[in-house]
Amino acid sequence: MATGGMTEDLRLVGISKQFETFTAVHPMDLEVPGGSFFALLGPSGCGKTTTLRMVAGLEEPTGGRILIGEKDITSTKAYQRNVNTVFQSYALFPHMTILDNVAFGLKRRGVKGANAAAQEALDLVQLSQVAGKKPAQLSGGMQQRVALARAIVNRPDVLLLDEPLGALDLKLRRQMQIELKRIQSEVGLTFIHVTHDQEEAMTMADSIAVMNGGRIEQLADPATLYERPASTFVANFLGQSNLLQARINGFGADGVALAQTHGQDVLVAGDNVPDGIQDVWIGVRPEKLRLGEAGRNRLDGVVTDASFTGVATQYLIRMPWGFEVMLVQQNDGSARAQVGENVVVSWDPGHEFVLDQHQAGDAGVGLGDD
Amino acid sequence: MPYALLAPGLLWLIIFFVAPMITTLSTSLQEGNVDDGFVFTGNVAIYWDALHAYWPQLVRSLVYAGTATVLSLLLGYPLAYYIASRRGRAKNVLLVLVIAPFFTSFLIRTMAWQSILASDGGLLVKVLGWLHLTWLFDAFGNVLQFLHLSPNGEILYSPWAVIWGLTYNFLPFMILPLYTSLDRLDGRLLEAARDLYATPRDTFRFVTWPMSLPGVVSGTLLTFIPAAGDYINSRLLGNTQTVMIGQVIDSQFLRVLDYPLASALSFVLLVLILALVTIYVRKAGTEELV
């Protein structure tokens, strides 16, 4: 399949959704560049699926507008929109053959050569051999790819994926992630992928909007989200974070800020400190912490737990003030610590992120684990 | 061992279906009269006589039953669709209302239509009278007469009344299977169709209707088969020109006491219905009905 000419941007302007007394999506703006692989990431109930359904036309927004390019599609019906969805349940038509399923959209629009195009789409997902079968005769992974082919064949302006890999086992899921990414770059369509799996979003998406409580917490590329989370929710939802309560006391000459956490002086990169804020969370990812005195910032602690995972060892180390930090030590041959051992934990300035202390330090903790 | 589970059902079928069929078949081939007794003579010619004498009633039965089945489907489908789309309490109440007529005897329900449709003092003409709409009653009769569904413009005692009675009596048998298959229909499939450029009409035509076909097939069978053999509606709501085959069999058995002829007619009806049902189910494509 050749890449379509112009893939237009999708814009949501002040879009919102109210279900009786419950606000699923607060008014929000979102711009998805044409041809990109975009992910809406968040825990269940964060409004990501509702947002997706509003784009598909399956849910009517309470307010705001939806635009594809310059065209306002807010008031059009689902069947009038050049937007297709890969449903979580696949929703294949059980009474039709695989080929008829894939050709369904084209036939409804009266496109000539629907069956040939459907066959081609099945080739793309490597399922041409099952064209004559019924959905019930296929495995979950195959049904998933049929659902994808059924959506892609229509060359939609925007392809929506609603947790499409949720029902697959881990191995198949990894395989499909690579497959999806390959197909996306091959067809060049705009993909919007809704998921609660942060790893899935990070591996696949060019940019990710992290949603929480019907709002977008942060919109950025995966590396920025991970290295420079904009909120404690994002910091905890994407991977693990050690958040240390600290106070910024001043700025040094070499671009570092002087901070104090629980009576200990630490240095942070001045650029990381938000303007005009003194009370902060200093966040350090577990793999940025090191055992021993290699880093410039040093804290004493006692190992309370060590779990060896093969590629790394994960430690819990209790600080003098009772807080436990998590530290991941790569299995690179350096000496391992024992439970009960007194150790020094260190890291270098610049390896941290700094957040306003007004936010709860445990926002989003545990939500990203499933 | 699992076959043992079939035993009760099989026994039931043998005692109440196979055995009566054999006796019916054998009775039809006997000759004689009630006073002197009947003897088996293998008189196959009786079938020719029966068909020759009563083919109009046979054909009429199938036409009336077929029409009533189509009417039931037209009335029942939207209703079943509506019930299936309701939630919780409303759904249960509506289902009970569909079944409610069964609390009254079939005979009484049919007789009730006599007092509803009668032109002198019937409920319908009275209500229309209060509303100063009596002309509607007459107009309806005239339309029926024009359509040859009433000999003289009367609503009661007309072919229309018989078909209407059959439709009314067997409608629940249509609605319940339709409801079951429509209720099972996954709403997410309808969303998928909408998402794939199907207008509401297309969605019905390509998803809802084909997926409800199992219900349509069982509903039409459950309506058509008993309606074709019915003899109450044609007797209570019809006239001498609306006699159905069930009525003929009834009078041959119980009044004329010509058992061989009555048996032969029963057997012909049975074979006819079996043949029609077989063709129908084949055509509907049983393998598609999963």
Image (tube, coloured by chain):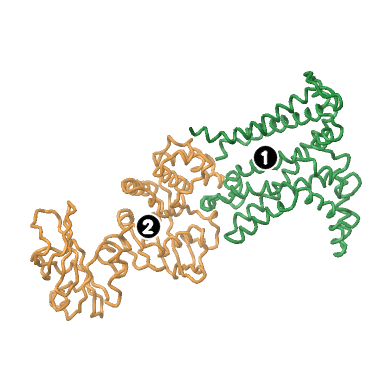
Quadrant holding the C terminus of chain B = top right
Whether residue B261 can be seen here: yes
Q: Position of residue A107 (x, y in %)?
A: 55, 44
Whether residue A271 can be seen here: no
Mark 1 residue crowding within 10 angstroms, few (<14) / some (14–19) / many (20+): some
Amino acid at dot 1 = Leu
Q: Give the left or right position of residue A254, taking residue B58 as reference.
A: left
Q: Nearer the viewer, mark 2 or mark 1?
A: 1
- The answer as to whether the residues below labels 2 and 1 share one chain is no
Q: Nearer the viewer, residue A337 or A195?
A: A337
Q: Please name the color used to draw chain B.
A: green
Q: What's the chain of the residue with tag 2?
A: A
- Tell me if residue B27 comes above or below residue A131 in the rendering: above
Q: Position of residue A84 (x, y in %)?
A: 47, 52
Mark 2 residue crowding within 10 angstroms, few (<14) / some (14–19) / many (20+): many
- Asked where in the image residue A47 lies, by quadrant, the reply is bottom left
| Chain letter, orange | A
Q: Nearer the viewer, residue B69 or A101?
A: B69
- Tell me if residue B251 comes above or below residue B207 in the rendering: above
Q: Give the left or right position of residue A157, taking residue A325 as reference.
A: right
Amino acid at dot 2 = Thr
Name the residue at 49% across, 66% down: A65
- Asked where in the image residue B24 lies, by quadrant, the reply is top right
Residue underneath mark 1: B221
Q: Nearer the viewer, residue A160 or B173?
A: B173
Q: Looking at the image, which residue sits at the far top?
A: B41
Name the residue at 24% across, 76% down: A280
Element class at badge 2: strand
Q: Give the left or right position of residue A50, taking residue A309 as reference.
A: right
Residue underneath mark 2: A195
Name the residue at 82% across, 50% down: B111
Q: Nearer the viewer, residue A14 or B104?
A: B104
